[in-house]
Amino acid sequence: MTTTTSKIALGLLSAVLATALMPASAAGWKVWEGHNEAAPRAILTDTSDRAGAVLVCDPMGKMSAILSMEAGSISDQLDVHATYKRGEISSGDNSALETTVRYSPANSVIEIESHTPAARIYNSVIRGESVTVSVDHAGEMETLLPKPDEAFKAFAKTCNAARKANAK
């Protein structure tokens, strides 16, 4: 093997290893476009191999969420056509929590505007637990959302600060 061939092989090996060792954010969470990267109020999964999620924190620190009911990019699945349905959210060993959700059958996405079930989804990410969603006339979905990464941690810090500021 020549020196040039060795350098090329070493370069390719380095590229493969770098790709394999990329941080979770490469296929984890990303900040919603237009939000401050250091203090985002909305983040979404950046995956297509599982059902995705969007977590939003309002200025009062109250969370809401959007979950896809099937695998695919949540960015591609978002749509405005939705109907209201009853649904249940559960994670880990927690009992199912009944809530009202907006369901879009055109793209299999549900929107959860209530803080408690959205916070349960948020906590499932921190604990590494799967989330199960069951929606009337839409079926059931279980997914394991990506682990917390830098985007998720920035979101958590922003939302916790908003909650503390408004708890006074």
Image: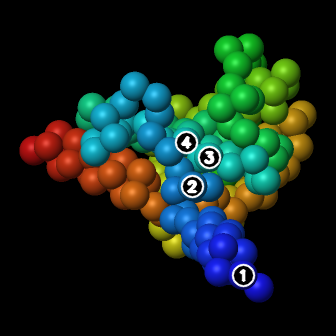
Q: Position of residue 155 (x, y in %)?
A: 36, 48
Picture quarter with the C terminus: top left
Q: Which is in the foreground here, disc 1 or disc 4?
A: 1
Three-letter code, disc 1: Thr
Horizontal side of 144 relative to 117 (left or right) equals: right
Q: Secondary structure at mark 3?
A: loop
Decide if residue 99 is in sight here: no
Give the residue number, with chain letter if any, for mark 3.
46
Q: What mark, if any, has residue 2 been given in the picture?
A: 1
Q: Earlier in the sequence, mark 1 or mark 2?
A: 1
Query: Looking at the picture, which amino acid does disc 2 mark?
Result: Ala
- Whether pointer 2 and pointer 3 mark residues with C-beta atoms closer than 8 Å, the reply is yes
Q: Residue furthest bottom?
A: 1
Up-down relation of residue 141 to residue 80 (above or below): below
Dot 1 alpha-carbon crowd within 10 angstroms: few under 14, some 14 to 19, many 20 or more: few
- Circle 4 is placed at which residue position? 44
Earlier residue among tags 1 and 4? 1
Q: Amino acid at mark 3?
A: Asp
Q: Is residue 168 left or right of residue 24?
A: left
Amino acid carrying label 4: it is Leu
Residue on which disc 2 sits: 26
Q: Earlier in the sequence, mark 2 or mark 3?
A: 2
Q: Earlier in the sequence, mark 4 or mark 2?
A: 2
